[in-house]
Image (cartoon, rainbow, N blue to C red):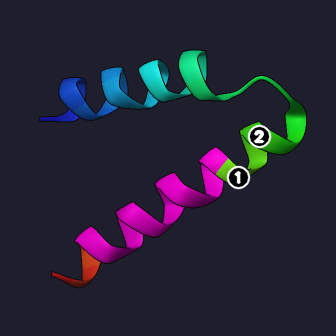
Amino acid sequence: MKKLFALTIIAVMLVGCNTVAGFGKDIEKVGSKMEGAAKK
């Protein structure tokens, strides 16, 4: 599960992060997803 999660994060970074601002937004989304998963 951890490997799949890590690969997903890497894929999102490679595809969606064209700028530093974009990178920050992506990290924020990942943090929100992790927070939501922790609450379940």
- Which residue is the extreme one toward the bottom? 39
Check whether the beta carbons of the residues at disc 2 and disc 1 lie within 8 A of each other. yes
In the rendered image, which quarter contains the C terminus?
bottom left
3 relative position to 1: left or right: right
Confirm whether the magenta stretch covers residue 32: yes
Q: Position of residue 24 (x, y in %)?
A: 76, 48
- In the picture, the disc for residue 1 is none
Residue at position x 61%, y 28% from top? 16
15 relative position to 3: left or right: right
Above or below for 15 versus 21 = above
Q: Which residue position holds label 2? A: 22
Instruction: Please tell me in which quadrant of the rendered image residue 29 appears.
Output: bottom right
Name the element at disc 1: helix
Above or below for 29 versus 5 = below
User: What is the distance, in whole Å, between disc 2 and disc 1 at their CAs?
Assistant: 5 Å
Confirm whether the magenta stretch covers residue 30: yes
39 relative position to 17: left or right: left
Q: Nearer the viewer, residue 4 or 18?
A: 18
Above or below for 29 versus 8 = below
Q: Which residue position holds label 1? A: 25
> What stretch of residues is rendered in magenta?
26-37
